[in-house]
Image: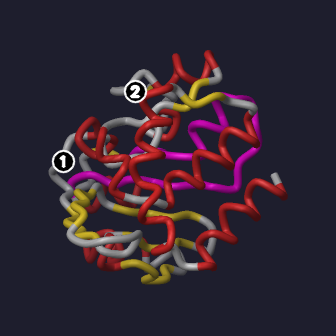
């Protein structure tokens, strides 16, 4: 994080599954950093002297560092076609953490934490964790049919229930299930079966 700050990062947050699992008292291998104030190329340049940086998702603003940490810049996503693949991605290092969290699937995955443990929770994900509730961050949940399977595996793994509005969003997206690639379906089932 020091190298990123020295390069001009205005904020570095731990986001997604690691924060959720940490708050549940679980170990997590899913470590994602979201970097504000730097472009993708600036992040890669800052980290390359001391780390192995794999350019795994430049169009998404994501790099894999030392094979274990996903480092990304905040991004906007907008669906422009059918299925799971037709998205317009716009990385934007000037977004706020609250804006960046809005693209996430469930409130429990939209919690961010800084290096001091201070949490940013614009959708009350901590409250939903305490209740054992899966709730979509917004109506945009229906833009990605894979989110239904993610909801299934989260409900099974954590023994959570889905709120009624999110259940309806899952039903709304059912016509697009055929668009999911078999490997993505398998990935969600594998997470459910092995965790």
Secondary element at image label 2: loop
In the rendered view, tell whether residue 45 sits above or below residue 39: below
Which class describes the residues within 10 Å of circle 1: few (<14), some (14-19), or many (20+)? some
Q: Nearer the viewer, residue 37 or 104?
A: 104
According to the picture, the residue beneath numbered tag 1 turns out to be 95
Q: Residue at x 21, y 41 (%)?
A: 96
Place residue 71 in its image quadrant. bottom left
Q: Which mark is residue 121?
A: 2
Mark pair 1, 2: CA separation: 15 Å
Q: Nearer the viewer, residue 162 or 95?
A: 162
Q: Residue at x 71, y 48 (%)?
A: 28
Q: Which mark is residue 168?
A: none
Magenta residues, start to end: 12-37
Q: Residue at x 54, y 79 (%)?
A: 181
Mark closest to the chain's N terminus, 1 or 2: 1
Q: Residue furthest front?
A: 175
Q: Residue at x 23, y 41 (%)?
A: 99
Q: Say whether residue 50 is left or right of residue 78.
A: right
């Amino acid at each position: 994080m020091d190298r990123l700050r020295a390069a001009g990062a205005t904020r570095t947050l731990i986001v997604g599954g690691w924060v959720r699992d940490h708050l549940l008292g679980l170990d997590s291998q899913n470590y994602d950093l979201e970097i504000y104030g730097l472009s993708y190329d600036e992040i890669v340049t800052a980290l390359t002297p001391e780390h192995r940086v794999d350019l795994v998702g430049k169009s998404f603003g994501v790099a894999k560092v030392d094979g274990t940490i996903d480092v990304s810049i905040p991004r906007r996503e907008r669906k422009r076609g059918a299925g799971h693949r037709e998205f317009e991605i716009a990385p934007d290092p000037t977004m706020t953490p609250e804006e960046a969290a809005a693209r996430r699937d469930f409130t429990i995955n939209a919690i961010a934490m800084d290096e001091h443990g201070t949490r940013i929770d614009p959708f009350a994900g901590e409250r939903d964790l305490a209740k054992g509730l899966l709730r979509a961050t917004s109506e945009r949940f229906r833009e990605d049919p894979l989110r239904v399977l993610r909801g299934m595996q989260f409900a099974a793994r954590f023994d959570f229930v889905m709120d009624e509005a999110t259940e309806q969003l899952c039903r709304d997206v059912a016509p697009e299930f055929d668009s999911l690639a078999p490997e993505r379906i398998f990935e969600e089932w594998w997470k459910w079966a092995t965790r």
